[in-house]
Image (cartoon, rainbow, N blue to C red):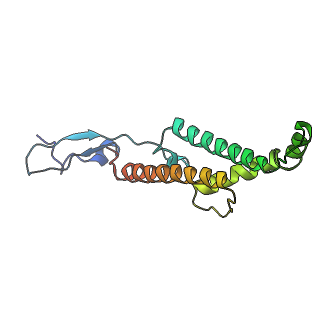
């Protein structure tokens, strides 16, 4: 008949087909069409869907803003007028540099490179919640990445 593995290989079809692995020896073989996906530099993002990556980014921004707000509460002195408080907050805490610093801190916690001291109790509570979330996301990503690499591309 001429369609066994010895006479009808994938190289004869341009490398797009491969034979199934036989469970037992039989004169009958099968042909499976292989789909080849192009490799890009963003292949490490494939274990999660894009919506989940966006939500992780939003979570980092929320943690950064929350941390900035908690730090700004330290500037409050009893008896200050709202105008003096807002002037003090914008001068010291609430600006682009403060947001960048707190966003960097939330990203570093997510990537296990936390080197910042969280001195107050509200900051420690925020850090504990963010660490718990980070552990869950990193463990899930690791499991999905392992499954992604062990799945055959057939």
Residue 135: x percent and y percent?
Answer: 49, 54
Of all residues shown, which one is farthest toward the top? 51
Of residues 100 and 132, the one drawn nearer to the viewer in this rendering? 132
Of residues 93 and 2, the one drawn nearer to the viewer in this rendering? 93
Relative vertical location of residue 119 with respect to residue 24 in this rendering, above or below: below
Residue 105: x percent and y percent?
Answer: 68, 55
Q: Is residue 50 left or right of residue 78?
A: left
Of residues 82 and 140, the one drawn nearer to the viewer in this rendering? 82
Residue 110: x percent and y percent?
Answer: 58, 54
Residue at (64, 45) in percent of width and height: 63
Q: Is residue 107 left or right of residue 51?
A: right
Of residues 70 and 48, the one drawn nearer to the viewer in this rendering? 70
- Point out the image quarter for the N terminus: top left
Total tally of numbered discs in the picture: 0
Residue at (26, 40) in percent of width and height: 32
Of all residues shown, which one is farthest toward the front? 79
Which quadrant would residue 31 be assigned to in this image? Answer: top left
Residue 56: x percent and y percent?
Answer: 57, 43
Residue at (52, 49) in percent of width and height: 133
Q: Is residue 110 left or right of residue 93?
A: left
Which quadrant would residue 128 be assigned to in this image? Answer: bottom right
- Point out the image quarter for the C terminus: top left
């Amino acid at each position: 008949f001429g369609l066994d593995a010895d006479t009808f290989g994938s190289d004869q079809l341009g490398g797009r087909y491969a034979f199934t692995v036989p469970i037992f020896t039989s004169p009958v073989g099968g042909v499976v069409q292989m789909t080849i996906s192009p490799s890009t530099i963003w292949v490490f993002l494939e274990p999660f869907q894009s919506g989940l990556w966006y939500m992780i980014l939003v979570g980092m921004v929320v943690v950064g803003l929350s941390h900035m707000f908690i730090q700004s509460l330290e500037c409050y002195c009893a008896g200050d007028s709202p105008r003096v408080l807002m002037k003090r907050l914008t001068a010291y805490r609430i600006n682009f540099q403060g947001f960048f610093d707190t966003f960097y801190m939330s990203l570093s916690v997510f990537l296990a490179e936390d080197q910042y001291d969280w001195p107050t109790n509200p900051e420690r509570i925020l850090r504990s919640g963010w660490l718990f979330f980070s552990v869950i996301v990193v463990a899930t990503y690791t499991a999905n990445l392992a499954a992604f690499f062990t799945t055959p591309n057939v």
